[in-house]
Structure formats: C-alpha cells, structure tokens
Amino acid sequence: MTTEPDTTEAQTAEPSPTAPAWRLWILLVWHPALGLPVDPVAVLALDDSRQPAERVVRWVPLVYDAADPWRKRLGETTTGEDTERWIAQSGGACSLEPADVPEGALDLTHAADLVLDELLAEVIPALPRRGDG
Amino acid sequence: MGTGSKSSHASYAVGPTAAAEPDDVVAEAPAEPMSDEEVQAKADLLMAMDLLGELADPPFAIDPEDSVPTDPVERYDLFVGQVEQAQEAIEKLKEAGASDEEIEAHTKALKAQTLAYLNSLDEDDLREIAEAKGFEHPALVGLSGKGQHPLVHWLDPAYPSGIPSKEKIQAAALHRYQQLLAGETVGGMSLADLHELEGTEPPTSNGSWSATPEEAKAAGGALTGAINAYNHAAKYTAGGPQGEALQAMLAAEHKVATVDCPELGADLDKAKAQASLMVDHALTHNQLWATDVKPLVAQAVAAGELTETQANHLTPRQLVTLMRSTTPEGEVNSLTELAAQRKQQLADLDAAYAAHSAVAPGDGEPLKLPPASAPEASQAIAAWAKNAGELKDLQHEAHGWYSKSQQSLGDDPFAEHPGADAAKYVKPDGLTHDFNAWAKEQKLADLRAVAGEMGMENSAAATRAHVQQYIAASFNPKYDQQAIKDKVTAGAAKKEAAKAAKTAAPPPPKANGGLASDEGSQALSNKLSKSSTNSPSKQVPSAAKPVKAPKPGSFNANIQAMIAQVQQAKATSQDVPAYVDAKEVAGWTFGPGTKASNLGGTYAKTVHSAPDGSQWMFKADHNHGGALGHTEAAASHVLSLGGVPAVPVYHHKKADGTAGSIQPLLKDAKPFTSSPSQWTQSQVDAIVQSHVGSWFVGEHDGHQDNWLATPSGGLVQIDRGQAFKHFGLDKLSVDYAPSGGGGFTPIHQKLYQSALGGGLAKGVKINPSAAHPVIKKFESMPDAQLRSVLHTTAHEGAKAGVAWVPQMRSRAAKALKIPQSQVTHAQVASAFLDHAVERKNNLRQDFADFFVKQMGLPSGASLKHGGGS
C-alpha cells in the first residue's frame, strides 16, 4: 500500500515549549434560529512559530453543507493574515472566535481536540435547532 | 405562598363580582380547583424528583434491599428510570392543563437535576456506563479530564437519544479511532494504549476481495492517484469532469476498504484507515454541487445502493457520505432517517400548498375565503389561517435543502412541488394585507367567532384590530397570540376596575388566580414547586459535584448567555426589519449587553434588548471613534431610500462612551448557498438591484457568505461595513473585486461571470430593466437629501482618516488647485459628498454602459431612457 497519512490536515508538532505561539479559533457559521453567526463548525489551530504556520483543523462531526463557507475559505494553507482578514470580514454570516489554549495540551492537534471536546460537551447541546431542514 | 405556582393564590377568597356584561366576562379568570389528574401528576413528579436526589446522595438504608446499588451501570439504570417517571409526570401535568411556564420550570429543574447527577460521576464511571449503553470507544472523548465531560451530555436522559448533539459525540470518538488505526496518536494515546485501556483486541481486517500484497499496494496507489485527480478536478473544473473524478475516487476508496490480504497483517488496517482519512480530507476541502454527483447518484440508484428517497431528499455531501463504504453505520442510519423525514415534510408541504393556493391564488387576486357569516365558515377560516402558518414553516424548513437536492436539477425543478418554489412562499405581510382587506367586509361578531375557534377565549372583548391580528398571528410572526389575549384581558380588567371603583364594590380577584381543591393539594403544590424550581444544589446533596459553570468570558459562557437572551425574546422577526428614523432609535434605551463575541476587545459584539423586546447587535468601533458606525448606518439608510433590501443599521454610543453601530438581529433568515445555475429569475433580479445599491455606496464585499435568504424567499445582503472603503478608486466592472478571491468574490460578479459563461439555469438571464426601479428611486432623491444623509459619515470619516480619505484629499486638491497637505478635513468631506452626488446622478448612464459594453446586452441601452418618466 502506498497511501500516506494526511499531513495537511493535522501536522502535529512535538510537545512544545512554544505554546504561546499557538492560536486557536472556533469557526462559526450563521445560525438561522438565532440570527447570528454562532454555530460552530470547526476548530482551527495555528502555530505561528513555524514557517509556514503549522495548521490543524478539527471539523465538528456530522456537519454537512453548513460548513461550506469555511471549507471555501480555508483552502490548503492558513496564515495569521488570513485570520486577521476573516476577523475584519466577520460581520456577515461567518465569524470566528478565539479560544484559549487548553491547559495540558500535548501538541497543537491535542489542543484542537480539547477545544472540540468542549464544544461537543457544552456549546453544541445548548444551541437550539437550526431549523433549516 | 410566593412560589409562583398556580395554586399559590388558593387561600384568597374570591369576592363576589358585579353582574357581568358579556364583554367583561374575560376579566375574571375562572377560579378552578386543581383537578385530580393534576394533583396526581404533581405527586408523581415530587416522588420522582425526591428519588433522583436520593440516588445522588443515598440515605442510610436499614434493609440492604433498599440500598442504592454501588455498580455505576445499575445505578444509572435506576436513575434513568426515575427521570422517565418524572418526564411522564410532567407530560401528565401538561395534559391536565398546567401553564407553559410551570411545565418549563419543571423541565428545567429536571435537566438541572440530571446534569448535577451525571457531573457527580467520575470519568471512569462515565466511560463504563457509556460503554455499557453502546458507546464505542468512550476513552476517545473528554480527553482533558477537565471541564464538563462530553459523555455527560451523551448519557443525559433529559435529552432524547439519537439527537444530533449526541450523535456528534459518538462520531468524534469514531473519527479519532480511525486516526489511531491510521497510526496517529490521540491525546498521547496510541491504538495499542486504547485497546489496553479497553481490554480489547485491535480488529482484524476483513475484506470482500482477496489480494496479494502487490495487488493491495496497487489499490492504494490507485487511490492516491484518484484523490489527486479529484483535487485537481474540484479546483479547476465543474459538473461532468468533477463528477467523474469524484466517482473514481469513491470507487478506489471502496476497493481499498474491502481488500483482504492476511499477509499484510496490521499494516493493512493502518493503510485502510489512512486511505479513509485522505478521502475525508479531499471531500472536506472541496465544494460538492448537486450536478457533480448526479451521474454517481443515478448509478447508485440503478444498482440499488441508494433508494429514490435518499437520492431525492439529501444534499450532495450527505449523498456522498452515504455512498462511501467507510461511513459508520450510525451515520448511515441517521441520513436514511433524515431522507424519510424530508420526504414526509415535502408531502405535507404539497398538501398545505394545494389547500392554501385554492384560497390565496396570489398575483394580486383577493382571498377566496367564504363570508364569515356563512354556516361553519368560522371553522373553515380558522383552518385556512392555521394551514397558512404551517405552510410557511414547511417552506422555511425545505428551503435549506431542496435547492441542493437532485430534485432541483430538472428543467422545471418545482413541477412536482410548486409550494417549494421561493416565488410561492407565504409572505406574511402581504397575506396579512390581503386578509385585512377581506376582513374589512366582515362583521366583528363573525370575526370574533373565527378567533374563538382559534383559541381566543376572550374574543368577545376584543376589538376588530385585535381579532384580525390574532387570526393573522397564525402566519405572521409579527403578531403574538398570547400577547394579544393578554392585551385584551388587561383592557377589560381596566374597564372592570373603573366600574368597580365607581360602585365601591370589592376588588375583583387577580386574573390568574386559582383555587386549590383542598389543603393537601395546596401543601403538595407548594412543596413541589419549591423543590423543583430551587437551585440544583438544594436537591442534590453535597456529595454531588456542583454543575460546572462555563469559565466566565469563555466562548462557551458567552454563547450560553447570549442564547438564553435571544431565545427569551418574543419572536419579532419580519423578513427584514424596516428602517426607522435614526433619531427615534437614538432615543431608545437598550438593555445591558450579552457578549456575542470576544475578539480581543477590538471587534467586540454584544446583543441587547430594545424597548419592544426585540434583539439588537452592537458592534464597537474602537479604531475610528465611531466613524465606521456612521458609515454603515449611512449606507443602510441610503439603500433603504432606494428600496434595496438592507438590514437597518444605526450609529450608537453606549453609556460607557463606546461608539459603534447597532442593528436588529435577522432571525429565521438562512444562508443563501445555492449555485448560480440554480438561481431563479427573481433571485437574479434581486442581485442586479442590490448591485446598483452596492455600487452607489461603494461597497464591494457582497460575497455569497454575506447573503441570506429570508423566510419569504427574498434575499438580503448583510454587513455593509466596507461601504465607501474604495470610494473614488473603485470601478463598475465585471472583474472589479478589491476583497475578492478565496471565496470572497462578490455575488454580482459571480452572477455576471456565470451569465457570460452560460452558467445560469435555462430561461434565467440578466435583465437590465430590473435595475431600473432602484435607479429611479435613487435618482428621485434630491442632492441635498443625499448630502444630508452622508454629512456625518463624510465629516467624521475625514477626521478619523478612514480608508477613502487619501483619494478624496487628492480630488479636493485637484479641484481647489492646492497642495494635498493644505486640504482641510472639511474640504475632504466636501469632495466625498460631491463624489456621492456625482455617482448618484450618473447611475443610469453608468449601468446602461455596464450592461451594453461589459455584459454584451444591447437591451441595457434602454436604461438610458428610463429617467424622468
């Protein structure tokens, strides 16, 4: 077999003393029932200390078309400039929120997984139905 | 007393009332005792809640048979049993007529109780119970051991099993397991670690076709090639080629997933998992359109791998998920169920539309309702109004998926389901207008009978306006039936009080008073109400860990507070809230804000309640001292004057001096996600009209993510924060998009490029005349009015040095023939206003040229002749 592991989606760093260079974002889309972009579809983790910035994306499971705006935006790579641009344009139907680097995260991938766990445990259960079928 | 329960007024004597006139009857709510059913249901609920408390902190039991089991799974089973009994009791209470508020309070109390109990369990117990209840690989969620564990929600019996939020937790664990199989680690854990923890063996690979190691490797190589080909096709092609590449990739994945090669041992499982993750990645990062999957779906249906129901009622991404052989069974079942639900939804929509359109043919025709005085008319009219509301909801539900389904691909996508066409959506305001026109001809007594039929017990005291609004509330969310009833009751009570004061009669009882049947039920109610509405800490003894509150300021805390606030508000949604005078809004007092965003304080957004209970969002403008708030407010005002749908935005200063903008939330609107080939003529016309407005206010950020479909099927662009940013430098051109690329192509550009490339649906075209009414409205705006609307934007912007200032400084310097360094703020502002006026007055000529020269549409020339008529 010649298949290779997916290295684009989750390039994992070693346990790093450079945790402050990690930045985590919760990617949000429009929630029809609430009238605001507050529905989380993914966690984006960046390590700016690497060139190019190391990126991990953890998608919220079982989200289908609702995540398309972020699929389009993310592309192959993401830089700090991209996130700045998205913040500046976050008044529309998409938005992103910074998340704290979770205590005890072993690496960037683990950090993203921990934020995803928090979304699954507390945020997503609290959201009302989207109401779009 | 004082518990807020229905029976808390039980000991009040109900005084005699004056002889009631028919209109006054409603003022005195009947003082009904609690029914036996209600008493029994409350007793059952109390018992169940008490037992739940005992499970969390078992009392000492003399008889061992009475003691609570120590095995966590057995104890959980007992807990679930008690929760089910409590839920049953709440249901009975509801049937017995308890108020919505009381039911909500009990439900909330029960949820607090279940959460407290599950939070009291340690991680090992949670995992053991979850595993016993069928959760696969529970050690792969809750990786930190901190914060609330995801399994707490998964195990919570207060929420039905199988709901999406629970399914996502299982799906996350399965995805992580796939990563372990692929040789990755999860939270520092390897595949071997996990199986050691679980006490299980790693799975051995089975396949449906036997292969030599070379054949297996060749299958892997073929998949890598197919993934590369798909990524390329998805990026650079559309339709056929992309569909073929997708088909090839899924076939290659299936081949790898089903290979059997014992010689490769564990390496085969690893390679299979890697292959699945690579396909996940490819699909995740590319858009999937209905046309791309069409041949694949047709083939799968022919082969019996997909049913017609699945094929016709799921979106492309959902269909591809179903067709992959690596999709977990649980997800396949959920999608199959979803397809069946949607099929039923569409059948209901068809029936509701047939009934509705027979009465409301549209196109300006009046409603064909029977005279309200006719025999049995009140039932028929009430049924029609309710059906209209149901149809509106069904259309709203179908909107999100129908346009992405295979059904939308035909030449006439709505032939079988005309009610799913956005052009046929129930438009609440328009229908209310037609209904009022019909109602005007009816007698008030007959309308009251209709309202009575619809549950307005106090219709006899209601005015014509109240009754009409009450009926229209069935389909128009602007009105609230309960609020109208309350208003009628309050009015009647006021009238009664005045009468009572005159005759010095004893005061009437409180309208919501109730009389308990006996002392026992009173005591029971008080106890129950106290125990069920108090904080969980009183119910769950100290042995239980307190419910973990989200960290203040965290995303979770912000979002939970915001959701609570937004949901509490009465539904005030209209399609797009109307623009009201900015001075009026400036006089409103908004409630304290709930954080909707926490972007480092720079882009902070908060949600506030307006005096009418509606929800508004405040966006701070720290960088420009409020100049951007003025800009967005001015742009929305200008657009409203031209009849371009826009969310009204107002400049606002908070009590603490923070300046920014404030705007109402646009509830129930949904992302506009369909592709240009699916856009209808009315959607295309709406985009053209909006383009006129966008050009006028120099706003070029209208990418599709910033567009929403309204409940009535209209379109609106939100976020005009980039208005005037490139003013004076910008171009009215098919290619001009200063913020374009990476998904930020303005929607009008997408439209024009699709039209030029033949990518619009059959019969749909760019119609230059659609621009005419908007241009005409803008033209009719006097120059002085435009200068007045933009005055503050111009002057504040000039002072704050916003993006357009250098360009306007240069223009002013040229016009005044002075060096740029000598141009004052006032002169910069003046150049800005001159340019805005010039743009307004050239709109007709500019768009005529645009359509003729750039779009190659000779009919665009006729726009030139539309002015002044």
Image (cartoon, coloured by chain):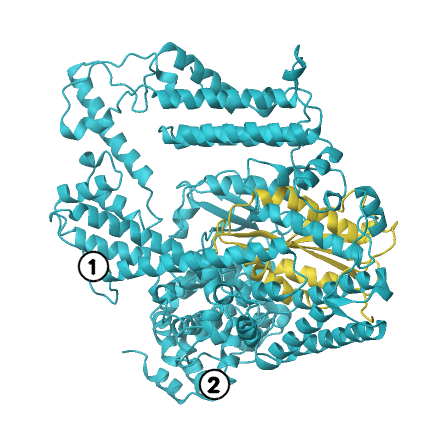
Chain colours: A yellow, B cyan
Q: What is the x, y in percent for residue B2?
A: 43, 17
* Chain to which mark 1 belongs: B
In the image, taking residue B439 as reference, residue A28 lies left or right, namely right
> If the image is split into quadrants, where does the C terminus of chain B sit?
bottom left
In this rendering, the answer to whether B577 lies above or below B786 is: above
Q: Judge from the rendering whether residue B85 lies leftward or rightward of residue B801; answer left or right.
A: left
Residue B150's tag is: none
For marks 1 and 2, give the one nearer the viewer: 1
Is label 1 in a helix, a strand or a loop? loop
> What residue is shown with label 2?
B855
Q: Label for residue B367?
A: 1
Circle 2 SS class: loop
- Marked residue nearer the N-terminal end (1 or 2): 1
Q: Position of residue A74 (x, y in %)?
A: 68, 64
Q: Is residue B546 left or right of residue B352?
A: right
Circle 2: residue type: Met
Question: Which residue: 64% across, 23% down?
Answer: B56
Q: Position of residue B264 (x, y in %)?
A: 86, 65
- Viewer-proximal residue among B316 and B69: B69
Amino acid on which disc 1 is placed: Leu
- Nearest the viewer among B376 and B341 is B341
